[in-house]
Image (tube, helix red, strand yellow):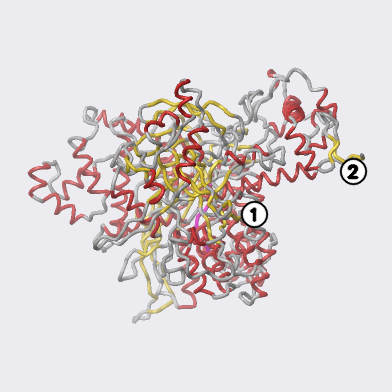
């Protein structure tokens, strides 16, 4: 029979799993195996090493010569059985010198690769273009030039000029940026209290705007281009009707100059492509910003040596201006450049996305109905051609630009991306809306998971020109859905307009595939239809990052992105059990695709998972036809999902091109300006209003640069941030709202300004390692403590809690009764206190612990909440986030104020009692849920003062759920239940440093919902729950991406071993 032999000790095991367990459990075999893997990696790198004198640092490692006959180029073993005994017995005693990274960065050999919580390397391999972004001399940046000019004008001693002082400047800024119209500003300045007490130098709106207009302006000035359109309709005199239109525009090249010269962007701008990789061979790319994707590197090859590319990003979308009456609309066109980081681009306050024009909005009634649509299409392209004309020469010849870092570069602005929804994409691509704007798929084949031939700009342009010349529409153009419109992009250099069209997460995924299609299909497949689904939404267990749908979803009339995203968090759990398993699998595939598409940085694995989710849906979608819900899948939004992978590889992660960004900009660049106007010639007034706002923003940035104003907070708003938590709305669930109000009623609330806070630090390790290390010190209530603990990258880095507890003298008996801790509270507390490390105590103190007993009347400090500081996950955000744990009692109704129920958070906890259980893989240390277990917090407290010296952090009494063992095959979630022993709830006292994060438990509703369940009692009455991976994007990274990756690695290690005969 076959057996599996350990290459170290040569013992034989009957199974692959047994071999893996043997090596994991035998220290000598495990150490030899780990050392062998490290040595193999060093040998591979050493084989690529080139003598320092002869190396070309600008040539990527992947393109350098590799000796094909070198035995050191053998691949690393994929499994234990690939190793030979001699590999262990003859390990070299000295290490080879380490090689270089893809450019010039050294890699310390004795250090383990550091990775962050999401599994992304902290120090990836970098490949830079050898000539891109060359400089041609030094220069003054925007603010240096501005400061020099102001000194010459005599403003050197008063940085606030033309205002008298800082207070006058701040009032002027408030009046202009608040959205008040000119009449309101005039009324305010004429108030007697304003004139007598404020005594500003501007007394009315005229003098006020004179001051504002003295602020320095940018280089891009507004101009109005008048268009006269002659139609085919005749007026009363028999003459052709004409219509005069206005195109308001700014020079896009001047706008780009303003962006690259702004020193405020110095920390978030790149002038050359910068490819990132997980490995030294450039085989595992990391895709995030535009400079990490392929387009920039490819376009650099066709430009002159030393060229600096400015990847132009356009966005356009018509928006309604009038609210209740009238049909006033605007059609803004926005511009940014891919040199600036996407997080900065989508922050409105950063002003990295600028307005370059307002397209005319008209019905063209001077044309007959059969020509009107065609002429509207052509008008759009004619206006865009006029607007973007300066890019033709600049993109061909380059423009010398003074950059914010003080150097001059030859910049080539090239159109790289265009953000638009599907109708506008078809308008841009000159194709009909029932066709794909990127490829030549037939309308009836859009539901197939097949890659079709892409549209090609030159051939499309030839067909359009031929059709316009002959005034006919050939059959080939009809089949391809091409409109005979002369496109604006015809003369733009190096422009593939079809590849410029970017993924639209809002309209294609959240609104399109999920809300408009998947929700309707799945609801129709549920027994009980809408009523059952609505009731399940109303019964859902609460969480602070989840909206409560108290009336279900069928009665919602105003849908926004927040509603879509909150439905996505729980929809799979809602339909599970009530719908066919094939429906559940299909819905899960769509949700996985949406969540992977949201990643802000991609690895080759996450992109493979994105593609796999798309293909899984296509394999599962037949169920909707079988159940009579759909006849076909020939619609644009489903087909568009097949283009996401290519777009991400080419232009960077999809979050950088979400249409939520332009829609948010409509508020600042269109709606507020319209409200500040008198509604007559409003576009002219809006352009003037915007010019003044930009001047105020530029002057504010200049003052910050001068250090006379504090810098703006790093926590600038994100135009469409939704990574973890609900943006711009309050959770309306009774339990969560009650806990929040309860936190406001008494005592200093955490995270507010009502009371002082203290913080604790956990170990700040970033490696997925199980090694115990000494953590940095932290100060807690004046004491400096050291935290030594075993940690994973996913563990919190610290916490914040109220310095003065809201309930400082709560007895143990009150905790046992009011908080539901029960009679086990004192026993578990004493058990915990006896188990703590006593090495810092004196002998007498240690002896006293032998008789440790906590009395029923012992008083303890009780807290309502604690905020955990979660580590950064680059897939979710470039900033660390916080996670609030609540343990709040119910608040009875008082007068007009309704009562609110209690809220006790469910959390993921490191259960020390589970350590070492079920470790059947040599890669156990990379398991993201290793030792984790679900628990419910009942009370957050500190022990009585006589035992305060035993603990370093606040404690929590928790009730346990069963361990995480296996995921449900269709839902893909772990199933847990209350953990009991002889029908008694298992509970413990733990330190809060054992808590990893809050979690959400979805009730397993089964075939039909138990009507006695409600949000306030479902956690007590429901027998089983799903651990929700869709609550937040960070939960998805942990419970789906990292876990799937670990399981795949484990499977590879256990299934690719070579067999040997016994």
Q: Please provide percent x and percent y for residue 843.
A: 48, 20
Neighbor class of circle 1 (other Cα within 10 Å; few <14, some 14-19, many 20+) is some
In the picture, the disc for residue 533 is none
Viewer-closest of 914 and 762: 914
In the picture, the disc for residue 2 is 2
Left or right placement of residue 543 versus residue 930 in this view: left
Q: Quadrant of residue 116?
A: top right
The answer to if 421 sits in the magenta stretch is yes
Magenta part mainly helix, strand or loop? strand
Q: Please provide percent x and percent y for residue 126.
A: 61, 33
Neighbor class of circle 2 (other Cα within 10 Å; few <14, some 14-19, many 20+) is few
Q: Are marks 1 and 2 in contact (CB under 8 Å)?
A: no
- Give the residue drawn at x 60%, y 45%: 602
Left or right placement of residue 611 versus residue 159 in this view: right
Q: In which quarter of the image is residue 258?
A: top left
> Which image quarter holds the N terminus?
top right
The magenta segment is 414-422
């Amino acid at each position: 029979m076959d057996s599996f032999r350990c290459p170290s000790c040569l013992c034989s095991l009957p199974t692959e799993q047994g071999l893996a367990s043997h090596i994991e459990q035998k220290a000598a075999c495990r150490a030899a195996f780990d050392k062998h893997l490290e040595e193999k990696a060093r040998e591979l790198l050493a084989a690529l090493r080139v003598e320092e004198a002869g190396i070309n640092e600008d040539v990527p490692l992947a393109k350098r010569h590799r000796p094909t006959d070198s035995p050191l180029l053998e691949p690393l073993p994929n499994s234990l059985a690939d190793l030979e005994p001699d590999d262990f017995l003859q390990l070299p005693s000295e290490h080879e010198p380490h090689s270089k990274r893809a450019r010039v960065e050294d890699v310390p050999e004795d250090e383990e690769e550091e990775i962050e919580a999401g599994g992304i390397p902290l120090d990836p391999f970098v490949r830079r273009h050898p000539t891109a972004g060359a400089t041609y001399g030094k220069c003054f940046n925007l603010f240096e030039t501005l400061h020099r000019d102001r000194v010459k004008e005599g403003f050197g001693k008063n940085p606030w000029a033309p205002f008298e002082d800082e207070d006058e400047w701040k009032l002027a800024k408030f009046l202009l940026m608040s959205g008040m119209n000119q009449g309101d500003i005039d009324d305010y300045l004429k108030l007697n209290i304003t004139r007598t007490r404020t005594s500003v130098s501007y007394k009315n709106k005229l003098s006020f705007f004179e001051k504002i207009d003295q602020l320095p302006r940018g280089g891009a000035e507004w101009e109005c281009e008048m268009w006269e359109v002659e139609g085919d309709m005749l007026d009363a005199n028999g003459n052709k009707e004409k219509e005069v239109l206005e195109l308001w525009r700014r020079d896009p090249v001047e706008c780009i100059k303003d962006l690259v010269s702004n020193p405020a962007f110095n920390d978030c701008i790149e002038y050359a492509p910068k490819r990132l990789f997980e490995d030294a061979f450039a085989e595992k790319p990391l895709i995030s910003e535009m400079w990490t994707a392929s387009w920039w590197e490819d376009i650099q090859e066709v430009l002159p040596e030393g060229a600096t590319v400015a990847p132009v990003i356009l966005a356009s979308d018509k928006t309604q201006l009038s609210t209740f009456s009238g049909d006033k609309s605007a059609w803004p066109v926005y511009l940014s450049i891919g040199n600036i980081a996407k997080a900065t681009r989508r922050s409105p306050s950063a002003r990295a996305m600028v307005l370059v024009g307002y397209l005319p909005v008209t019905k063209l009634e001077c044309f007959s109905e059969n020509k009107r649509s065609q002429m509207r299409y052509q008008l759009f392209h004619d206006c865009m051609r006029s607007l973007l004309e300066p890019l033709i020469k600049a993109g061909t010849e380059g423009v010398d630009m003074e950059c914010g870092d003080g150097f001059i570069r030859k910049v080539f602005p090239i159109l790289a991306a265009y953000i638009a929804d599907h109708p506008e994409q078809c308008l841009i691509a000159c194709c009909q809306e029932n066709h794909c704007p990127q490829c030549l798929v037939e309308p009836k084949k859009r539901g197939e998971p097949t890659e079709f031939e892409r549209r090609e700009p030159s051939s499309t342009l030839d067909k359009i020109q031929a059709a316009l010349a002959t005034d006919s529409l050939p059959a080939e153009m009809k089949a391809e859905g091409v409109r005979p419109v002369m496109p604006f992009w015809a003369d733009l250099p190096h422009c593939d307009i079809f590849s410029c069209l970017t993924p639209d997460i809002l309209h294609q995924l959240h609104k399109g595939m999920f809300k408009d299609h998947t929700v309707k299909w799945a609801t129709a497949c549920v027994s009980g239809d809408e009523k059952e689904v609505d009731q399940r939404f109303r019964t859902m267990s609460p969480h602070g990052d989840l909206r409560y749908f108290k009336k279900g979803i069928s009665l919602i009339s105003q849908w926004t992105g927040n509603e879509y995203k909150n439905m996505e968090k729980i929809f799979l759990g809602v339909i599970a059990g009530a719908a066919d398993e094939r429906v559940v699998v299909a819905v899960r595939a769509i949700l996985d695709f949406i969540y992977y598409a949201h990643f802000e940085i991609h690895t080759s694995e996450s992109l493979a998972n994105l593609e796999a989710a798309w293909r899984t849906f296509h394999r599962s979608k037949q169920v909707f036809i079988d159940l009579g819900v759909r006849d076909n899948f020939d619609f644009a939004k489903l087909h568009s999902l097949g283009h996401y992978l290519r777009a991400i590889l080419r232009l960077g992660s999809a979050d950088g091109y979400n249409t939520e960004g332009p829609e948010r900009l409509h508020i600042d660049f269109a709606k507020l300006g319209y409200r500040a106007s008198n509604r007559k010639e409003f576009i002219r007034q809006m352009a003037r209003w915007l010019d003044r706002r930009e001047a105020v923003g530029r002057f504010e940035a200049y003052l910050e640069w001068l250090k006379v104003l504090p810098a703006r907070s790093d926590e600038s708003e994100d135009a469409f941030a939704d990574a973890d938590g609900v943006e711009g709305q309050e959770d309306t669930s009774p339990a969560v709202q009650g806990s929040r109000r309860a936190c406001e009623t008494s005592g200093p609330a955490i995270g507010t300004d009502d009371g002082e806070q203290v913080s604790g630090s956990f170990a700040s390790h970033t490696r997925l390692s199980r090694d115990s290390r000494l953590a940095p010190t932290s100060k807690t209530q004046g004491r400096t403590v050291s935290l030594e603990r075993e940690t994973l990258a996913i563990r919190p880095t610290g916490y914040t809690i109220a310095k003065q507890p809201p309930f400082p003298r709560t007895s143990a008996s009150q905790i046992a009764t009011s908080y539901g801790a029960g009679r086990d509270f004192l026993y578990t507390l004493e058990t915990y206190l006896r188990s703590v490390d006593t090495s810092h105590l004196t002998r007498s103190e240690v002896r006293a612990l032998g008789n440790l007993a906590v009395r029923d009347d012992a008083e303890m400090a009780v807290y309502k909440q604690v905020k955990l500081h979660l580590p950064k996950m680059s897939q979710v955000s470039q900033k660390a986030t916080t996670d609030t744990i609540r343990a709040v009692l119910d608040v009875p109704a008082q007068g007009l104020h309704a009562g609110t129920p209690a809220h006790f958070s469910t959390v993921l906890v490191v259960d020390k009692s589970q350590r070492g259980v079920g470790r059947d893989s040599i890669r156990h240390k990379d398991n993201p849920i290793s030792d984790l277990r679900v628990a419910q917090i009942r009370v957050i407290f500190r022990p009585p003062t006589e035992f305060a010296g035993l603990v370093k952090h606040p404690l929590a009494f928790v009730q346990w759920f069963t361990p995480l063992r296996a995921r449900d095959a269709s839902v893909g979630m772990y199933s847990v239940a209350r953990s009991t022993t002889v029908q008694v709830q298992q509970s413990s006292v733990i330190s809060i440093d054992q808590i990893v994060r809050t979690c959400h438990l979805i009730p397993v509703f089964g075939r039909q919902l138990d009507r006695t369940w409600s949000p306030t009692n479902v956690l007590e009455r429901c027998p089983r729950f799903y651990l929700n991976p869709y609550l937040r994007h960070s939960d998805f990274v942990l419970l789906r991406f990292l876990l799937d990756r670990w399981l795949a690695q484990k499977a590879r290690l256990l299934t690719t071993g070579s067999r040997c005969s016994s």
